Amino acid sequence: QRDEKMASIKQAITAFILVVIFALIWQISRSINVRVGSLLATIKNISESNNMGLRSDLAGKDELFDISHHLNDLLEKLERLIHNTQEKSMQLTASTDNMHRELEGVMEQFHAQTDHTASMATAVQQMVATIGEISESTSVAVEGVHQAATNAEQGRSVVEMTVTNVGQLTGILSNSQQSIGSLNQHVDKIGGA
């Protein structure tokens, strides 16, 4: 009977130890699940909201705390990287805007230069047309000068011919006077007879 009592006590102690062990296992498992759930919730919130400012608030000295700590470090670096990227993007946008304004200025200068060149081309065309008109007028004037020279030459020839004719006529008149004088002498002789 004493052995049966000892066996019952041993069984009771064994059962109590098993219950305590299962309770400890359940408590540890529950604690791990809660901490893992908190870590997963933080990661899920970051994934859904794209908010790199969220951090895991797990405490302790176990492996899950190490994971949480490294996750927070990673998020911190990503946040700095994104911030730097945004700053670079803003600087690039500002530089692009400046380049765009400078390009617009260059295009305006180009259009102004094009208009100026077109005006110069028009002026040159007008100048060429004026030169052509002057050349044509000069040609007409030269032709007129040639015609005047020709007319003067012809006039000189006519004057020379007139002078020659006058000289011939003078000679004829002189001969006629001599003939008339001789005739008068004959008439006088005839009258004296």
Image: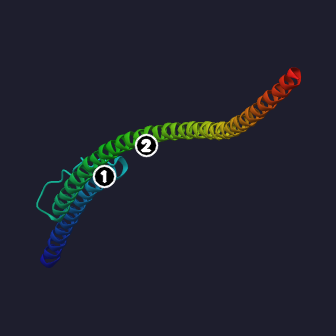
The image quarter in which residue 29 lies: bottom left
Quarter of the picture holding the C terminus: top right
Given residues 111 and 184, the one toward you in this image is: 184
Q: Residues within 10 Å of mark 1 (few under 14, many from 20)?
A: few
Name the residue tied to disc 2: 110
Give the x, y percent position of residue 76: 19, 53
Q: Which residue appears farthest toward the top when viewing the image?
A: 191
Give the x, y percent position of residue 115: 48, 37
**Which numbered mark, 1 or 2, is in the foreground of this view?**
2
- Taking the image as shown, residue 59 lies to the left or right of residue 180, namely left
Q: Residue at x 18, y 53 (%)?
A: 58
Q: Is residue 155 above or below residue 19?
A: above
Give the x, y percent position of residue 99: 34, 45
Return the disc, 1 or 2, that comes first in the chain's sequence: 1
Q: How many marks?
A: 2
Q: CA distance from mark 1 to mark 2?
A: 61 Å
User: Is label 2 in a helix, a strand or a loop?
Assistant: helix
Mark sitting on residue 112: none
Q: Amino acid at mark 1?
A: Ala
Give the x, y percent position of residue 9: 14, 71
- Taking the image as shown, residue 2 lies to the left or right of residue 106, namely left
Mark sitting on residue 41: 1
Quarter of the picture holding the N terminus: bottom left
Figure coloring = rainbow
Q: Is residue 91 above or below residue 81?
A: above
Q: Residue at x 37, y 39 (%)?
A: 105
- Taking the image as shown, residue 133 lies to the left or right of residue 173, namely left
